[in-house]
């Protein structure tokens, strides 16, 4: 999912070899604690810096994925982020995450 201005995004990647990662795109770091706030509930992870954002390895059954599937909206919380510019709708995320998790095994 992306913000309305497409500046920030939250993405989930997985594969059948066991890869399972959550990524926040559009941020310049730093590595460390970043959070997703889903319908008012905060999920904090230790993210690593990547060329186009930050990412973290998560278990395929992590509660944040269930929250993303059932949630209405997500916002980001991290160093240097404006709170009011990171809101994203989760419309359609349940179907997309369900398909990804089903494919990844």
Image: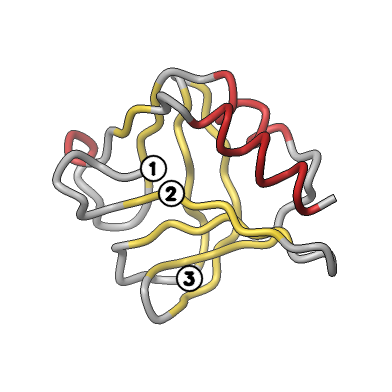
How many neighbours does mark 1 have within 10 angstroms: few (below 14), some (14-19), or many (20 or more)? many
- Furthest residue in direction left, as rendered: 5
Residue 27: x and y in percent read 31, 64
In the image, what residue occupies the spot 52% across and 23% down? 41
Q: Which of 27 and 9 is in front in this view?
A: 9
Residue 101, quarter of picture: top right
- Furthest residue in direction bottom, as rendered: 51
Query: SS of the residue at dot 1?
Result: loop
Q: Disc 3 designates what residue?
A: 31
Quadrant where the N terminus is found in the figure: top left
In the image, what residue occupies the spot 35% across and 51% down? 9
Q: Distance between the residues labelled 2 and 3?
A: 16 Å
**Labels 3 & 1 near each other (Cβ < 8 A):** no
Foreground mark, 3 or 1, reads 1
Whichever of labels 1 and 2 marks the residue nearer the N terminus, that label is 1
Judge left or right: residue 89 versus residue 4. Answer: right
Q: Disc 2 designates what residue?
A: 10
Q: Which mark is residue 11?
A: none
Q: Which of 83 and 69 is in front in this view?
A: 69
């Amino acid at each position: 999912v992306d913000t309305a201005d497409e500046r920030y995004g939250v993405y989930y990647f997985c594969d059948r070899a066991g890869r399972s990662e959550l990524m926040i795109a559009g941020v310049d770091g730093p590595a460390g604690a970043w959070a997703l706030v889903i319908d008012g509930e905060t999920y904090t992870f230790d993210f690593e810096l990547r060329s186009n954002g930050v990412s973290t390895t998560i278990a395929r059954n992590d509660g944040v994925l269930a929250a993303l599937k059932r949630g209405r909206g997500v916002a980001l919380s991290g160093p240097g982020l404006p709170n009011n510019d990171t809101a994203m709708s989760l419309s359609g995320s349940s179907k997309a995450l369900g398909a990804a998790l089903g494919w990844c095994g």
